[in-house]
Amino acid sequence: MNLEVGQKIIGMLRIWLFIPGLAWLMLSCEKEALPPVVETTGVIDIGLNSFTAQGTLVQTGDEGINQHGFCWSTAPGPDLEADSCNLLGPRTETGAFTSKIQGLDRNTTYYIRAYAVNQAGSAYGKEMVVQTDRTFTVPLVETSGVHTVTEYSAIAGGVVRDDGGSEITSYGICWDTEQNPTIEGMHKEFSDGTGPFFTSIKNLELRTIYYVKAFAINSTGLAYGDEVIFRTNDTPVTDIDGNVYPTVVIGEQTWMARNLEVTRYANGTLVPFTPEDEWWDSLRVNEKGFCYFNNLSSNGNTLGALYSWSAAVNGQDSLNPELEPIQGVCPDEWHLPSDGDWKELEVALGMMALAADSTGWRGNIGGLLKSTGIDSWLIPNTGATNETRFSALAAGDRFPNGDYNNLHFSTFFWTSSNYNQDNAWARAL
């Protein structure tokens, strides 16, 4: 095209000046995004199973880094597509960064490089080669705990977490009635495999405190796990009706691990059977009575009986039941737990003393006492572990108007401690 760029008048003649072949081009320019620039600057603190990688962001791009970190592998060229990489997050500023890489194999060669990602793409620093430490150590072994404790036996276990760089030649459990048991004393030893292990320890003494440790041996030496304490149980308890109750030791106390269903006091006197709604509706604090949930005697075999407080304490009263225990409906040589007994249990299971002294729902140790099945507690039976083997069932309760309530939802335990003339302390799960 031709473009008119000016004109000049000479006399009466107008002269137009044209520059042929010149055109105006309207152009727009887009700035290209800058890719990141990252460097792998070093590897320090090399250990048996870890090292610390160092890198530097030299250029982040106009809008910063979306992600950065390190990639590593036992083969050259680790990248974001196929290898182990950590995520250190977005970043807008240049500068150094570090990260501890853990969970590695000992005496192994790794290839590592820094990386950075922005809108323009991914970039890697130079590849560095590092070898984890080959030093041999004693094994790392843990004592898993003790369970299924009876009067004369228990099951204890452990796990070898690290073989120390050489083959485990033997491992097992040692125990004693004194602290710090060793393989010089009572122990069980194995040599097949290195995974989690459990074993039954037998011929223990009745109601005795034992100390247990797992151990493992390799060519470097012998290692022990942490010490675990447990106490063997008392013999099962039999009430006057012939019902048998297992027992468990929690802290320094021994508890029955089943709800009472006895119908007579230890001296043979009958506990009044009071299934009628009218009796519970007119119940007075000093009246004795018991029933079974929904008036079904079969519930007594599984859930135990429901007792009025006066029946539970057998009309006894004590200004200080901690010092003067009340036998109540319990078998001989046993007593109805006081409020203080329950507090001791709660603190032994980890509740703060201040919380134990408060009222209402408090603490989070109830699950340690609850049976884990769903035949008693409603699904999902939240928090139930029954680690204590107390095996509390959701036996429900009976309201003063005679209504049965809370079956499969909760359970209630009387204490021998009265709060005032008309009320007594209880525990609920």
Image (cartoon, rainbow, N blue to C red):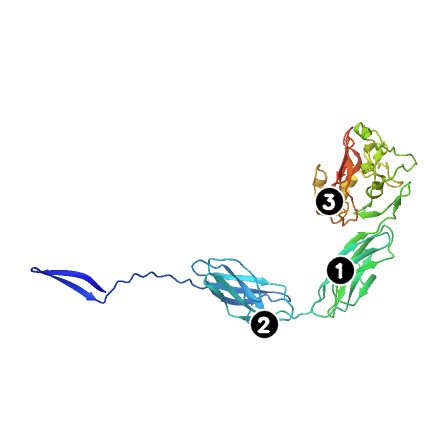
Instruction: Report x, y in % for residue 163.
Output: 71, 67
Instruction: Report x, y in % for residue 97.
Output: 52, 61
Pointer 3 and pointer 2: residues touching (CB < 8 Å)? no
Query: Of callouts 1 and 2, which one flags the residue occurring earlier in the amino acid sequence?
Result: 2
102, above or below 267, in the image: below
Type of amino acid under label 3: Leu
For the residue pair 417 and 118, the one nearer the viewer reads as: 118
Q: Say few, some or many: other residues with alpha carbon within 10 Å of mark 1 (under 14 / 14 to 19 / 20 or more).
A: many
Q: Say few, some or many: other residues with alpha carbon within 10 Å of mark 2 (under 14 / 14 to 19 / 20 or more).
A: few
Which dot marks residue 75? Answer: 2
Residue at the extreme left = 11
Type of amino acid under label 2: Ala
| Residue holding disc 1 | 158
Secondary element under disc 2, as helix, strand or loop, is loop
Distance CA(mark 1)–CA(mark 3): 33 Å
Quarter occupied by residue 224: bottom right
Quarter of the image with the C terminus is top right
Going 12% across and 61% down the picture, which residue do you hit? 8
Distance CA(mark 1)–CA(mark 2): 35 Å
Secondary element under disc 3, as helix, strand or loop, is loop
How many marks the image carries: the answer is 3
| Residue holding disc 3 | 378
Secondary element under disc 1, as helix, strand or loop, is strand
Mark 3 or 2: the one toward you: 3
